[in-house]
Image (cartoon, rainbow, N blue to C red):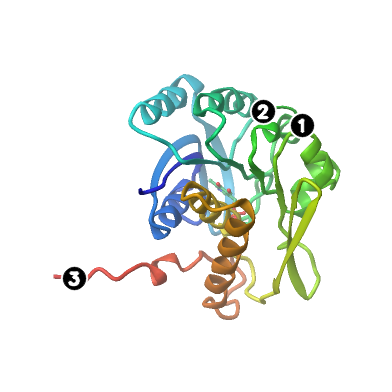
């Protein structure tokens, strides 16, 4: 079975983050990507300039056409630009039924700089969307903004598991911590000096979602996707010009011979 992964999120035309990179990661993990755009962004390595939410009557129809086309084995929710869309996404996701794992990856800032999430976005995640998540994947600042830094509060809001990503912390080891019921599993990895890199959150979440779609447990999916991302980051080498870089996904893709 080829895992089919529904991707709800933003279009980054410079390809450093968002649905295009999500779809690439799903394909690299032997899955099929089903991308539904919720927001179009104007951004590149120099900054995140503006976002344009897609009208709900448009993306909801796109979403329905995807669901009518075959099974979905997991869903990943990425960039959402406004609180009203958070609520609509939470409502529409019920169409997937209770057995499809849903990964909610909140986005409140952009590595390119210049993106300020609307003030009502964090409360909308807390009140409407986190409760739908099989796995909720905030980084430390996002957990702070949405739940005051308390992973237990995210579990109490209905998330079945929470992966708190330590990429933004300062410790010499980079630690992601998975909270599930009463269990706490830490995944500690070497902190790499690579400078700003775009799309790391998107790539990790898409890799986890594809593994969940293929039937992996949440713990195994987080561990293996995190190890895979760390290996990818190690191929980057030291920073070049201080501007955010893209992850070198093309370098690890299977080679297609030119004829
Ligand atoms: N733009 C889009 C469309 C995204 O989906 C995301 C993250 O999910 C971002 C920008 C921010 O990503 P990063 O800070 O990793 O560049």
Q: Which mark is residue 256?
A: none
Q: Which residue does the numbered mark 3 point to in the structure image?
A: 258
Q: Residue at x 77, y 40 (%)?
A: 155
Q: Is residue 13 above or below residue 240?
A: above
Q: Disc 1, ligand 1: is the CB inside 8 Å?
A: no
Would you call the spot at circle 1 few (<14 residues within 10 Å), some (14-19), or many (20 or more)? some
Occupied quadrant, residue 27: bottom left
How far is disc 3 from disc 2 in space, using C-alphas? 46 Å
Q: Find numbered disc 2 in the image and state the secondary structure of the residue it sits on.
A: helix
Occupied quadrant, residue 15: bottom left
Q: Is residue 167 above or below residue 78?
A: below
Are the two marked residues, 2 and 1, in contact with CB atoms closer than 8 angstroms?
A: yes
User: Percent x, y for residue 168?
Assistant: 74, 61
Residue ranking furthest to the top: 57
Q: Find numbered disc 1 in the image and state the secondary structure of the residue it sits on.
A: helix
Q: Residue at x 57, y 43 (%)?
A: 78
Question: Sequence order check: which comes first, mark 3 or mark 2?
Answer: 2
Q: Which residue does the numbered mark 1 point to in the structure image?
A: 123
Q: Residue at x 74, y 36 (%)?
A: 122
Q: Is residue 103 left or right of residue 42?
A: right
How far is disc 3 from disc 1 in space, using C-alphas? 50 Å
Would you call the spot at circle 2 few (<14 residues within 10 Å), some (14-19), or many (20 or more)? some
């Amino acid at each position: 079975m080829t895992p089919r992964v529904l991707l709800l999120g933003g279009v980054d035309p410079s390809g450093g983050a968002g649905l295009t990179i999500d779809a690439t990661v799903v394909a690299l993990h032997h899955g099929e990507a089903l991308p539904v755009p919720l927001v179009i962004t104007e951004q590149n390595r120099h900054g995140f300039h503006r976002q344009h939410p897609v009208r709900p009557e448009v993306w909801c129809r796109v979403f329905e056409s995807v669901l009518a086309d075959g099974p979905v084995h997991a869903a990943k929710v990425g960039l959402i630009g406004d609180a009203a869309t958070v609520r609509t996404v939470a409502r529409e996701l019920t169409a997937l039924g209770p057995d499809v794992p849903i990964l909610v990856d909140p986005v409140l800032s952009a590595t390119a700089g210049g993106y300020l999430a609307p003030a009502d976005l964090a409360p909308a995640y807390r009140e409407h969307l986190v409760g739908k998540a099989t796995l909720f994947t905030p980084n430390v600042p996002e957990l702070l903004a949405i739940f005051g830094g308390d992973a237990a509060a995210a579990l109490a809001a209905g998330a079945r598991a929470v992966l708190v990503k330590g990429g933004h912390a300062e410790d010499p080891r980079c630690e992601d911590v998975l909270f599930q019921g009463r269990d706490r599993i830490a995944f500690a990895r070497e902190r790499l000096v690579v400078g700003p890199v775009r799309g790391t959150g998107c790539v990790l979440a898409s890799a986890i979602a594809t593994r969940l779609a293929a039937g992996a447990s949440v713990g195994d999916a987080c561990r293996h996707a995190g190890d895979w991302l760390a290996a990818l980051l190690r191929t980057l080498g030291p920073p070049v010009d201080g501007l955010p870089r893209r992850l070198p996904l093309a370098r690890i893709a299977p080679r297609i011979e030119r004829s």
